[in-house]
Image (cartoon, rainbow, N blue to C red):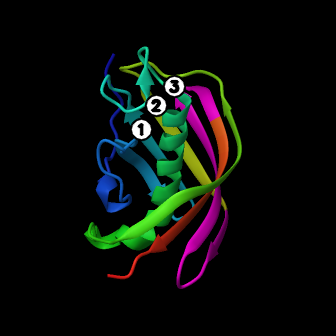
């Protein structure tokens, strides 16, 4: 079976994360209010235990997918040197139905529910779904905080 073809978007243009804390391989689709990504679980991926990506890795993948929506503001036009601090400020809920195995490609979708933006920072709420072979394996609602650091 042939792998699906994506219009790959350079993830480094939207996230400050770098290996080994990078849990998104490709941004499949990105818009101001939604994003979708893929990630292949590898044996050397952080949080892999007994051949499966553990819950924290699934949550980190969802959070990084979500933060790329906000990252558009800071990392647009190839500005990979932007200094941004960001973190999960709350997880309103998370449901994990199964854990992906090494070699699995997960597909994560996120949609912006609410956003507050000031000149100093952004706070937002996003809903996410993570799928494996078309089956939902995780759902969450996450609050994120992002702030650009002064040079």
Instruction: Compute the Cα span from label 3 to label 2.
Output: 5 Å
x%, y% of residue 47? 43, 30
Q: Which residue in the rendered view is the most extreme toward the bottom? A: 119
Q: Nearer the viewer, residue 19 or 106?
A: 19
Tag 3 residue: 132
As for residue 136 lying within the magenta part, the answer is: yes
Going from N to C along the chain, the mark reached first, 1 or 3, is 1
Q: CA distance from mark 1 to mark 3?
A: 10 Å
Asked if disc 3 and disc 2 are in contact, CB closer than 8 Å, the reply is: yes
Compared to residue 39, the image places residue 77 above or below, namely below
Mark 2 touches mark 1? (CB < 8 Å):
yes
Residue 41 appears at what percent x and percent y?
38, 27
What residue does disc 1 label?
38
Is the magenta region chiefly helix, strand or loop?
strand
Residue in front for this viewpoint, 57 or 134: 57
Image quarter where the N terminus lies is top left
Number of residues whose C-alpha sits closer than 10 Å to that of mark 3, classed few (under 14), some (14–19) or many (20 or more): some
Q: Secondary structure at mark 1?
A: strand
Above or below for 99 versus 77: above
Graded by Cα atoms within 10 Å as few (under 14), some (14 to 19) or many (20 or more), the crowding at tag 1 reads many
Residue on which the image places disc 2: 106
Quadrant location of residue 40? top left
Instruction: State the residue at coordinates (61%, 53%).
Output: 111
Q: Nearer the viewer, residue 4 or 81?
A: 81
| In magenta segment, residue 137 | yes
| Magenta span | 114-138
Q: Residue at x 63, y 64 (%)?
A: 124
Q: Earlier in the sequence, mark 2 or mark 1?
A: 1
Q: How many marks?
A: 3
Left or right of 43: which side holds 68? right
Q: Give the quarter of the figure containing the C terminus.
A: bottom left
- Note whether 66 is above or below 145 in the view shown: above
């Amino acid at each position: 079976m042939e792998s699906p073809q994506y219009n790959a978007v350079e993830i480094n243009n939207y996230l400050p994360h770098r290996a080994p804390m990078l849990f998104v391989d490709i941004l499949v689709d990105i818009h101001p209010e939604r994003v979708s990504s893929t990630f292949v679980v590898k044996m050397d991926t952080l949080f892999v235990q007994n051949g499966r990506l553990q819950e924290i890795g699934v949550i980190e993948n969802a959070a990084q997918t979500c933060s790329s929506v906000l990252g558009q503001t800071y990392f647009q036009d190839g500005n990979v040197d932007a200094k941004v601090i960001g973190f999960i400020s709350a997880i309103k809920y998370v449901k994990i139905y199964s854990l992906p195995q090494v070699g699995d490609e997960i597909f994560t979708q996120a949609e912006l529910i609410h956003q507050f933006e000031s000149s100093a920072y952004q706070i937002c709420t996003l809903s996410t779904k993570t799928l494996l072979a078309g089956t939902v394996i995780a759902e969450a609602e996450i609050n994120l905080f992002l702030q650009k650091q002064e040079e």
